[in-house]
Image (cartoon, rainbow, N blue to C red):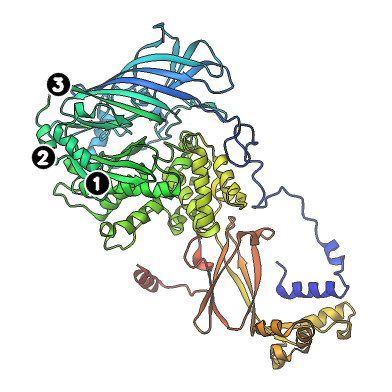
Amino acid sequence: MQSFKTLTLFVLLLATGFSYSQEEDQKEERVPGHYNNNPFKQLYEEFSTPNQYRSASGAPGPAYYQQQADYVMDIELDDKNKKLTGYETITYTNNSPDVLDYIWVQLDQNMRAKDSKSPLIVSSGAAPADMAGNFVNQYMGEGFDGGFNIQSIKDNNGNDLDYIINRTMMRIELPKSMNNGDKFVFSIRWWYNINNHVNGRGRSGYEEFEDGNRAYVIAQFFPRMAVYSDVEGWQNSQFWGRDEFALVFGDYEVNITVPADHILDGTGVLQNRKEVFSKEMMTRYDKAKKSYDEPVIIVTQDEADEASTSFDANKKTWKFKAKNVRDYAFASSRRFIWDMMAVKVGEREVMAVSMYPKEGNPLWEDWSTKLVASTLETYSRMTFDYPYPKAISVHAKNQGMEYPMICWNYGRPEKDGTYSERVKYGMFGVIIHEVGHNYFPMIINSDERQWTWMDEGINTFVQYIAEQDFGEKYPDAIAPNKKYPSRRGPAKNIVSYMSGDQNSIAPIMTKGLNTYNFGANGYSKPGTGLNILRETVMGRELFDYSFKTYAQRWMFKHPSPEDFFRTMEDASAMDLDWFWRGWFYTTNVVDIGVGEVKKYFVTSKMTKEVEEMMTARGMKESDLPPLVYLVEEGSDNFEESMRSSSLDDVSSLQEYIMDNLSPEEIAKLKKPKFFYEVTFEKPGRLPMPIIAEYTYSDGTTERVTYPVQIWKTSDQSVGKVIASDKEITKIVVDPDEETADVDTSNNTWPKRKKLGAFDSFKENKIKG
């Protein structure tokens, strides 16, 4: 960087008709050419070319299409044998311009088959100690006999269809090719053994209690159509267990037969409520539809305890219909307590619902349904009014998983009903997060199998806002913290990850299965990045408008990462390519600090440096027009120059003012006494706005945010000249730690003294 003095002289010489000699430049060694590595260059190389399906604005194009898959299913839960049986009819509609000769169906339960290859890709080592249950399951058990047993696949005329199963994907050969607008109707009959999700892990299954009862949370339970799109063609990536799902919207009609004493709820609207509800339950349900402040118990703990001893051999069928959903899930048990309350979302009434065994109390009865309702309010404000009739939170030990209108959540008190702050906030956070997934990706239907961050990271960002909203709405729930202690969201919370070993960090734009540190990469970093955009780069008004535009453009559609990036820029008039590249496509870090601070005073006396440069060029002082000089504090002629250091003493300045400004303009002029040249340095490669807080000798402070474009042509350091009528005593960069700066040791001027171990301990205790 040119120093302020050199730059001033350069401008001076240009103004008087002189220019620098080229001799020194010619002596310098030529720098070899290089690729454009400017962090502000556009993302044309990374982005796909806009087309008729996806426009350059980030909106769906005029020829955008998506397929549809409608399901009619009859499901039976065999509680005695822990087995699920199903018969489904799928109507698949080809809305694409392409001709299809076969279709792909997902068989996610096959990840649990005996011949599954998922365990083989997990690197393992001999642990010095292990939980007894884990040890038995891994080394002593026979292995779980899971996976789909496909009994038949037939077309609408009852003819067998040819198919081949490749692990978790099944290709079905079509009797004839499907053209645009064609529908194909076929049926699949299947069954599988339900896994114990507590001992064997998994996103669904059952938990068995000491009394012999089970609570079932059932998902990925039926063969499901894969997505066919303009981006991927068939999204037929195998399900290895970590990456989640890419699914097709459709309408569902589902009949679920379970033991008669079970309580059940799932995706969609219950069609035969009066058949499966008692009169007392109906009365309570009608009351819940009008209760907006407190949940109404539909099935009490005493009633659940009574049912838990019956083991009724009879069966009951619960019938549901769901419109325009991408998936289906349900929960069933005779041990469930059930409560509901209404929540107003726009012009609609939505039911917030919770189902939980008594092991979840008192936490669940106190807070689960209120968390559901509060979450719907926040997410609807940030995106669009929740379009479904209900949102259900189901208690499932060690679980956190989402489906349309229903999700599984953990958070279990001790047997005596006590619980720690960690358990409480763990439960609060997971309920908000999983209910929030109703928006991302259940409605804004991104490809989870490919881009984890598009549902998990975006959802984590809105979760942070929803947590803060919940804390404000229910202060008693978070006392004595006064503010919800969000784990993810604040920029400083991601620093330890970003500043870690680069060998174990991958860019966010990496397929989830292939990333290191899955939680930080897919959840924390993208969620934090969006929070930085909202609070520091764009501002809430611009960000919220753009974010809502994205949500409303892509609700009930399949967005790609580029659709999100482009929409955020399109709706805000902000070029954010530098941010997407740095935060999402690289593992670069933020590190901005104060490099050097020089103090100057104004004088009418030529400084020695200027005098020497004039002499070197054969110039005399008489060759120059009247000038204003700045002399650096501590320089050779500082003391001499300081004898005439007042603005009023500089005759050239006074002459210019009197000759060129009106009395009104003169009256408004400031009279700075101090001039500072502040150099900001950027050891980190990721640019960010410079947030500088200046403290003055009278104790006042001023905060200035220099836009990120200040780094546009100087990627290592930049300078700013500060004119002030007060002396600057302190400068702090990023005082509120809102940019994820990985090294704050260079953020303060004067430089902080390095603290000893005891002093450092004392300071941290005071901060804590």
> Is residue 218 visible in the rendered structure shown here?
no
Q: Quadrant of residue 132?
A: top left
Label 3, label 1: how far apart the Cα atoms are: 34 Å
> Is residue 394 visible in the rendered structure shown here?
yes
Using the image, determine if residue 192 lies above or below residue 413: above
Mark closer to the chain start, 2 or 1: 1
* Local crowd size for mark 2, using a 10 Å CA cut-off: few (<14), some (14–19), many (≥20): few
Q: Which residue is tagged 2?
A: 302
Q: Residue at x 49, y 68 (%)?
A: 735
Residue 54 placement (x, y as % from top left)? 60, 35
Q: Which residue is tagged 1?
A: 291
Q: Which residue is tagged 3?
A: 314
Label 2, label 1: how far apart the Cα atoms are: 22 Å
The one of 465 and 245 positioned closer to us in this rendering: 465
The nearer-to-camera label among 3 and 1 is 1
The nearer-to-camera label among 2 and 1 is 1
- The three-letter code of the residue at mark 3 reads Asn
The one of 298 and 695 positioned closer to us in this rendering: 298
- The three-letter code of the residue at mark 1 reads Ser
Residue 14 placement (x, y as % from top left)? 84, 71
